[in-house]
Image (cartoon, helix red, strand yellow):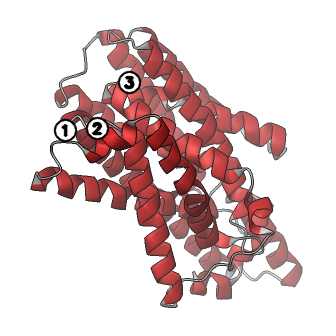
Amino acid sequence: MSPKAEAVSLRTARLLSALFYAVSSFLIILVNKNVLTGYSFPSSTFLGVGQMGFTVLVMYLGKINGIITFPDFDRTIPKRLFPLPLLYIGNHLTGLSSTQKLSLPMFTVLRKFSILFTLILEIVLLKKRYPLSVALSILAIVIGAFIAASFDLSFNLEGYTIVLLNDAFTAAYGVYTKEKINPKELGKYGVLFYNAAFMILPTLIFTILTGEFEKAIHFSKWTNVYFAFQFFLACMMGFILLYAIVLCSYYNSALTTTVIGALKNVSIAYIGIFIGGDYMFSWLNFIGLNICMAGGAAYSFVTLWEVPPLADKHPNKHNLEQQRIDLSHVSGTEKQKDLLNPNTLQKI
């Protein structure tokens, strides 16, 4: 495969994985919102247990049937995975709880702060540097979020606090996931399976100790076919979202994955204005929303759509290797060099 074809293939993989994550994240917020708010389901934590259980079941069945592969359990797995399970459960549960406590537009606005947190973590932990265009687009997102949040007429201190915690967990989870999904470590599927497997029992015990388990079990609408279907759908979407996060992180940087996650919802923010019944309109809030979306669109164009320049039409071996190194920087990290191998691209 020529270097130009490799560049196009890589860009296609980046775009498709980002789109898959955006759509998955869009759908799960709508489903979770309906289950937790529309049907007034009493426990977001219990729903999280269901999503983890669905993930463990699907991954295990895939492994025993030879559809996917990941390392068998041994004593080194917890050490190799740490601290990802703790970040995973923190991200998972704060995300569900914040969905329940805020209007959809304000939830999506405050989630933009996860971009800033991720940027800081990548600079501090991964020693990464970003061009001015990226910095300006992120600045626009944050400024828009400040404007929208400052003039939110439905201010909820508890909800705001939980969302900001969710942002911190999301940023840390994204940065560490980027490291752990290396095929030499646990790989994509190993991270998914062991994250859910390690945390499902502690989370279940937590629901029992807090009384949420009993409330969930005795919920009056379990016999409602529509609710039961949407609860199952929410569990399934929990697994799909986790897979989409890992896949997007595999092809893109942690920062790009976070940006896509926070911007998945240009549409959710606007849809929430007209449906849901919990959005209170103000012009400043609406202007802030639009600034956020404009900054996100600029970032997406700069990072996802560009094609790396090629040195010449007939590169020698040295130039080809240099171009692959350059491509790895565009994709977000030097650890992704293996992805640029044509044989690797064909297997994925």
Q: Residue 141's x, y, as percent? A: 52, 28
> Between residues 174 and 266, which one lies in front from this camera angle?
174
Is residue 19 something that shows in the picture? Answer: no
Quarter of image, res 277: top left
For residue 43, side relative to residue 117 (left or right): left
For residue 111, side relative to residue 37 (left or right): right
The residue identified by callout 2 is 36
Tell me how far mark 2 sits from mark 1, CA to CA.
6 Å
The residue identified by callout 3 is 106
Quarter of image, res 122: top right
Q: Residue 291's x, y, as percent? A: 44, 24
Q: Residue furthest right?
A: 318
Quarter of image, res 325: bottom right
Mark 3 or mark 2: which is in front? 2
Q: Residue 132's x, y, as percent? A: 70, 34
Is residue 139 something that shows in the picture? Answer: yes
The residue identified by callout 1 is 39
Q: Amino acid at mark 3?
A: Met
The quarter in which the C terminus is drawn is bottom right
Q: Residue at x 71, y 81 (%)?
A: 341
Marked residue nearer the N-terminal end (3 or 2): 2
Q: Are marks 2 and 1 in contact (CB under 8 Å)?
A: yes
Q: Secondary structure at mark 2?
A: helix
